[in-house]
Image: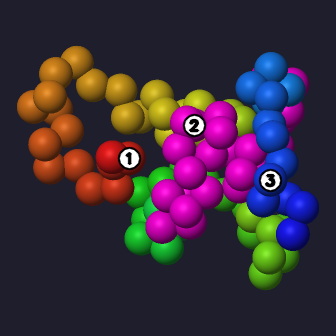
């Protein structure tokens, strides 16, 4: 599968409003498997299931999810579920 080796330029992502799972993972500095786990367990960003094999993310939803993860101290997230490690 050629998609596995695809290199994604972060500058390119700045122009996208909708991203696939790999692009979203690069945008979030995470991994596609982390996003897949969050989709199953809950607590991740809002996603769009385009088909059984294609999951999409809107950049605004990714930004909103990241903003919700912001904390002023370590005590603010001690009991939070779904946090990226």
**Distance in Å between CA atoms under marks 1 and 3:** 24 Å
Out of 36 and 1, give the one closest to the viewer. Answer: 1
The quarter holding residue 14 reads: top right
Residue 48 vertical placement versus 64 (above, below): below
Q: Are marks 2 and 1 in contact (CB under 8 Å)?
A: yes
Whichever of callouts 2 and 1 sits on the residue coming sooner in the sequence is: 2
Instruction: Please say whether residue 3 is visible from this viewpoint.
Output: yes
Which residue lies under the disc numbered 1? 84
Label 2 – label 1 distance at C-alpha: 10 Å
- Mark 3: few/some/many CA within 10 Å (<14, 14-19, 20+): few
Q: Which residue is mark 2?
A: 28
Q: Are marks 3 and 2 in contact (CB under 8 Å)?
A: no
Label 3 residue SS: helix
Q: Tell me the magenta residue range.
A: 14-37
- 74 vs 58, nearest the viewer: 74
Q: Is residue 2 left or right of residue 80?
A: right
What residue sits 59% from the left and 31% below the top? 63
Mark count: 3
Residue 72: give x, y in percent of width and height.
22, 18
Q: Residue at x 85, y 59 (%)?
A: 3
Q: Was residue 80 drawn as part of the magenta stretch in this picture?
A: no
Of marks 3 and 2, the one in the foreground: 3
- Which residue is nearer to you in this view: 42 or 32? 32
- Which residue is under mark 3? 5
Name which residue lies at 61% across and 57% down.
Answer: 32
Write down the quadrant of residue 29 in the picture.
Answer: top right
- Determine whether 34 is above or below 71 in the image: below
Residues packed near mark 2 inside 10 Å, few (<14), some (14 to 19) or many (20 plus) = some
Report helix, strand or loop for mark 2. helix
């Amino acid at each position: 599968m050629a998609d596995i080796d695809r290199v994604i330029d972060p500058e390119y992502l700045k122009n996208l409003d909708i991203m696939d799972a790999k692009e979203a993972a690069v945008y979030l500095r995470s991994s596609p498997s982390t996003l897949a786990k969050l989709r199953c367990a809950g607590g991740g960003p809002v996603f769009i299931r385009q088909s059984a094999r294609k999951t999409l993310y809107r950049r605004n939803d990714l930004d909103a999810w990241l903003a919700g993860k912001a904390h002023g101290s370590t005590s603010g997230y001690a009991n939070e579920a779904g946090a990226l490690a």
